Image (cartoon, rainbow, N blue to C red):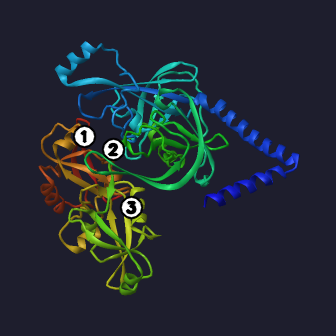
Amino acid sequence: MKSIKILLIGAALLSVAALPVSAKIQAGNEVKALQNNLREIAKLASPAVVYITTERKVKVGNGNDNGFGFDFGMPDLKKYFKRYDKDSEDEDNEGSRNNNERKMGGIGSGMIVTEDGFILTNYHVVEDATSVKVILTNDKKYDAEVKGYDVRHDMAVLKIKSSDKFPAVELGDSDKLMVGDIVIAVGNPFGYENTVTMGIVSAKGRLFDNMDIEGIPKRIPHVIQTDAPINPGNSGGPLFNIEGEVVGVNMAIAGNFSMGSVGNMGVGFAIPINDVKVKLKELKEGRKNKDETPWVGVRLQEVDEKLSKKLKVDSGVLITEVDENGPGKEAGLKSGDVILQFDGKEVKSPKNIIEMVASREVGEVVIFKIVRDGKEKEIKIILAPWGEKSLTVKNGNSEDKERKNKDVGITVKNLSELLAKKFGIKADKGVVIAAVEKNSPADKSELQVGDLIKEVDKKVIKDRDDFEKTMNTSDLKEGILFLVERSGNSIFVVISSEK
């Protein structure tokens, strides 16, 4: 095999030697043209890329203070950086004894997307930050505030606290990217400001599948894979195409961190800019989307040739198990059902369904087209937060009344310490809205995820059983009176099927 390789290389060298001089010069000019392009991108785009420093309080010994967030998941990077605090070691030790907390600094990258100073970055770069500062390439430093974020999709928007005008990047079209396209990453790896690296698009449409400390999957669909060197500190920085347009937001790297690897291994990931564009406006306006991973609650199996013949289906995915606590069970999915379509799109593999669910939001209604006992059937499911049932509340006990009244369109959970802490709820009883179905009566009446339902039609709600019983005696057509607590304030809301 080695001799073949040598011969091939030799042949290549001989063919180059036989090229006319003009051809060699032309090839050289093409390389120079590419080089000039890269220089121009670095020159024009770099001023709109910012160096982000954050300060946050962390519990001493919680093992989560590397300053880079969940994506790199590295053991300990303190040897590369000093702590970003102004306290002396003595003061820090004293603070640790008093409240078991200390200040930690983090670094990351971001890009200015508007001249008035809105910045796009990753959520994990600014997560739990008590202060955020941004540094431009001209060394000017500004305070910034977190305006909005989407935890599950790892996006955040900051606003520079200044009336100055700033250079801004141009957002491109990530759908036009093709595998093999040249891409350029700009950011601040390991704190080295304004570093420019180059690579290609290695793959498109990856499902970035991570796991949090509670064992809940963190899935981001449609991710771009690149071999452009990306390292800790690059998070939130832009990935440019060869035209100098932003096509992605650098997010994560893959590596064997248990073996002590802390740098780029040639496998980096970026969020497609088209996915960001969909959410950018609402994040600039202050929308804060919590970390809710949707699920259906089923185990799946490929349909091979033998199963296809036995089940009399040409394609699809077989359900082998339905979780008792999942929305799939609530909606009526059963073991042995073959899923043909997800919201009108053909299903080809279990991974295909996982990606489709991951691309949707909690509270959205999806339709599964299935085959059961040789008959096709459509089943509507409201996607619920991971590990929870999707409670579709109907009103009245008779089948006729259920048909007459629309669903309220909410998923509720019993109030727990975790939910109380998550949503800042001080009450000790009630049910919390975990999901609101889009365009439902609840959505149109502006009920929100995190609202605590205290009363329904003047009846006190202590738990989910109370809620279901009361809802079954209420009439959606006449209107249902909810008393909810939101951000510490109590408000009455009427939910009605009337437009």
Q: Is 147 on the left-hand or right-hand side of 372? A: right
Q: Give me the residue at 20% from left, 25% from top.
A: 100
Q: Which of 110 and 400 is in front in this view?
A: 110
Tell me the quarter of the image containing the N terminus. Answer: bottom right
Q: Position of residue 350 (x, y in %)?
A: 39, 67
Q: Label 3, label 1: how many angstroms apart (C-alpha)?
A: 27 Å
Q: In which quarter of the image is residue 47?
A: top right
Residue occupying image coordinates x 51% and y 42%: 249
Specify whether 383 is left or right of 230.
left
Residue 375 vertical position relative to residue 483 in the rendered view, above or below:
below
User: Dot 2: what SS?
Assistant: loop
| Depicted 20 relative to depicted 127: above or below | below
Residue 290: numbered disc: 2
- The answer to whether the residue labelled 1 contacts the one labelled 2, judged by CB atoms less than 8 Å apart, is yes
Q: What element carries label 1?
A: helix
Q: Earlier in the sequence, mark 2 or mark 3?
A: 2
In the image, taking residue 461 as reference, residue 196 lies left or right, namely right
Q: Which of 78 and 450 is in front in this view?
A: 78
Q: Camera-side residue: 439 or 419?
A: 419
Q: Residues within 10 Å of mark 2 (few under 14, many from 20)?
A: some
Residue receiving disc 3: 354
Q: Mark 1 points at which residue?
A: 422
Q: How crowded is mark 3: few (under 14 residues within 10 Å), some or many (20 or more)?
A: some
Give the mark, 3 or 1, whose residue is nearer the N terminus: 3
